[in-house]
Image (tube, rainbow, N blue to C red):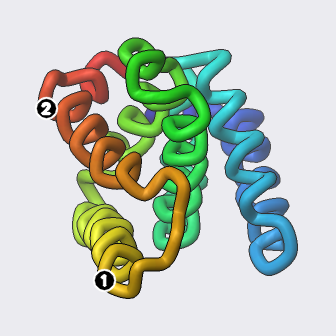
Amino acid sequence: MQQWMSCRATRTLIDITAQCLQCLMHSDTESCIKALLDTSVIHSPYFDWVVAHVGSCFPNTVITRVLSCGLKDFCAMGYEHNVKNPKLNSVVGILGHLAGSHFQDIRKALLDLFEVSLLYKLYCVYISNLSYIMCYIIYLNNLFLSGVWKKT
């Protein structure tokens, strides 16, 4: 990553991306993160570090949104079809890059996701894919432990 960031053109593009994300922070963050994540999937594992670097500028927002986009994809595809889901591999790769300096932010985002699932169960609020939240967290953990994030 340091080699890429030492290149002036790459550094400029990354800075522009971060500035665009900052401008969209309050209006359309989800679409912006989804676009970054989709690009990461297409160019994985070579683009995960870019999303992670941009994510380090806005760790709470990016971590939460990357987890959210991954969860939506996980729910849409069903557990059986997620065995080799490239988007989830990118989610794990991005979180792996961020884990070194933002481990506590990732931990908090995962705990918040877990607590949301417990609150929904406690108050009997209907969510069609509630069980997927726990499966998703476990699945990400398995990918992370199996070393998918190290391959990026």
Q: Residue at x 63, y 17 (%)?
A: 43
Left or right: where does residue 95 sit relative to residue 69? left
Mark nearest the camera among 2 and 1 is 1
Q: Is residue 140 visible?
A: yes
Q: Give the image quarter of residue 116.
A: bottom left
Left or right: where does residue 24 sit relative to residue 15? right
Q: Residues within 10 Å of mark 2 (few under 14, many from 20)?
A: few
Q: Amino acid at mark 2?
A: Leu
Label 1 sits on residue: 122
**Earlier-in-chain disc, 2 versus 1:** 1
Tally of numbered discs: 2
Q: Residue at x 54, y 55 (%)?
A: 128
Q: Residue at x 40, y 18 (%)?
A: 80
> How far is the residue under mark 2 from the one under mark 1?
30 Å
User: Above or below — where is 7 with respect to 104?
Assistant: above
Element type where label 1 sits in the image:
helix
Where does residue 16 sit, x and y in percent of width and height?
A: 81, 53
Element type where label 2 sits in the image:
helix
User: Above or below — where is 103 with respect to 34?
Assistant: below
**Residue 103: which disc?**
none
Q: Is residue 3 visible?
A: no
Where does residue 134 sit, x and y in percent of width and height?
A: 29, 52
Where does residue 148 sit, x and y in percent of width and height?
A: 28, 22
User: Above or below — where is 149 with respect to 17?
Assistant: above
Q: Give the image quarter of residue 7.
A: top right
Q: Residue at x 59, y 46 (%)?
A: 72
Where does residue 104 sit, x and y in percent of width and height?
A: 24, 70
Pick out the residue farthest to the left: 145
Label 2 sits on residue: 145
User: Above or below — where is 15 with respect to 47?
Assistant: below
Q: Amino acid at mark 1?
A: Leu
Q: Nearer the viewer, residue 8 or 79?
A: 79
